[in-house]
Image (cartoon, helix red, strand yellow):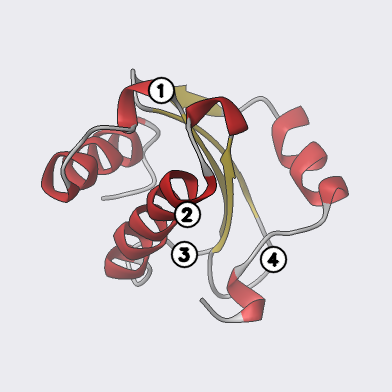
Amino acid sequence: MKKEYRIKKSSDFDSIIRKKKSFANRQFVIYFKENELDHMRLGISVSKKLGKAYKRNKLKRYVRECFKIRKDFIKNYDVIIIVRKGAVDLSFEDFDKSINHVLKGCKLLR
């Protein structure tokens, strides 16, 4: 994922979470707010409680791939996705369906 599409600073994370626009299911929590850019930005948070590094990295790759597929449909938003324990053992297809459900729930996908 290119640098301009990433959210890395903790101050950016804090400002998005403080907006309190969110949606959740058993696998994910998503926080979002509008930005002034012409593209979306994505921040991913995976707790160390979810497993060893290879498992957490796999989950982050899944999230990035799901958003790469939909990046043209999500404009002008900063999105933070927090992966929950329910997502650890999902196949990619179920993972993708769950991400889609969360995005439709918070009306980021049309």
Give the label on residue 75, or none: 3
Q: Mark 3 or mark 4: name the one nearer the start of the chain.
A: 4
Q: Distance between the residues labelled 3 and 2?
A: 26 Å
Tell me which amino acid carries mark 4: Glu
Q: Is residue 18 left or right of residue 1?
A: right
Give the label on residue 36, or none: 4
Tell me which amino acid carries mark 3: Lys
Residue 16 versus residue 43: which sits nearer the camera?
43
Give the label on residue 57, or none: 2
Instruction: Tell me where residue 91 appears, x and y as whole percent.
Output: 16, 43
Q: Is mark 1 on a helix, strand or loop?
A: helix
Instruction: Tell me where residue 62 appears, x and y as whole percent.
Output: 33, 55
Give the label on residue 85, or none: 1
Mark 3 or mark 2: which is in front?
Answer: 2
Q: How far apart are marks 2 and 4 (CA)?
A: 30 Å
Q: What element carries label 2?
A: helix
Disc 4 to disc 1: CB gap under 8 Å: no
